Image (cartoon, rainbow, N blue to C red):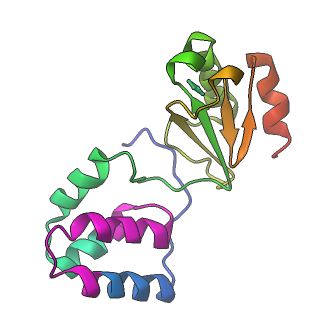
């Protein structure tokens, strides 16, 4: 983990903390409560930094190692914050054979982050994804809800520059 860039510092508002405590109080005595608690926590905070996992452990009595095991196993959970602009490159088969791996590398190089990370200013985060159902436009990437298709590596600097 030490190679990771420092992300945006984690901050927790009293409202977020109260919302999390309420979710835990409502769910904690039901079977299999951990998954829904984590899902709600991610909705409240946007991601699940270790500070949030520790709060959940303290409130539920579930060991932190167990919580960490779940959050790192399921790809629906993010331990890193997402950027204001969420860049997502499709590495599904149709996109991959048309060069989306190279596009992904170019974005890593330009933003200085890798899969699952967020730039220190909180502006961009980068993720790979599976087929987004736009194979006819391969290779495809998305920035928030905007879809970019038939990309070449040379298109990438100008596209990212629009969001700078
Ligand atoms: S494989 Fe990329 S959109 Fe289908």
Percent across and percent down for residue 65 are: 17, 57
Percent across and percent down for residue 52 are: 36, 70
Residue projecting furthest to the top:
97
Q: Which residues are magenta?
A: 24-53
**Residue for point 40% across, 62% down:** 48
State which image quarter holds ligand 1. top right
Where 55 sits versus 137, above or below?
A: below
Q: Is residue 16 magenta?
A: no
Where 125 sits versus 42, above or below?
A: above
Decide if residue 99 is on the left or right side of residue 51. Answer: right
- Predominant secondary structure in magenta? helix
Percent across and percent down for residue 56 are: 27, 74
Of the pair 89 and 3, the residue shown nearer to us: 89
Percent across and percent down for residue 139 are: 66, 21
Query: In this figure, what is the number of numbered marks?
Result: 0
Viewport quadrant of the N terminus: top left
Decide if residue 64 is on the left or right side of residue 118. Answer: left
Of the pair 134 and 44, the residue shown nearer to us: 134
Decide if residue 14 is on the left or right side of residue 125. Answer: left
**Residue for point 34% across, 82% down:** 23
**Residue for point 51% across, 51% down:** 6
Picture quadrant where residue 136 is located: top right
Q: Is residue 49 magenta?
A: yes
Where 42 sits versus 124, above or below?
A: below
Where 34 sits versus 133, above or below?
A: below
**Residue for point 43% across, 38% down:** 3
């Amino acid at each position: 983990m030490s190679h990771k860039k420092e992300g945006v510092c984690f901050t927790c508002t009293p409202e977020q903390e109260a919302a999390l405590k309420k979710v835990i109080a409502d769910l904690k005595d039901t079977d299999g409560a951990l998954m829904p608690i984590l899902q709600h926590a991610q909705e409240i905070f946007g991601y699940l930094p270790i500070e949030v996992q520790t709060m959940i452990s303290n409130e539920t009595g579930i060991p932190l190692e167990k919580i960490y095991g779940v959050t790192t196993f399921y790809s629906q959970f993010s331990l890193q914050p997402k950027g204001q602009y969420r860049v997502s490159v499709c590495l599904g088969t149709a996109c991959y054979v048309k060069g989306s791996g190279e596009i992904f590398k170019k974005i890593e190089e330009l933003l200085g982050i890798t899969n699952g990370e967020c730039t220190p200013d909180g502006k961009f985060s980068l993720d790979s994804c599976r087929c987004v159902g736009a194979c006819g436009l391969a290779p495809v990437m998305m920035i928030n809800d905007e879809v970019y298709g038939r990309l070449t590596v040379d298109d990438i600097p100008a596209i990212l520059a629009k969001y700078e």
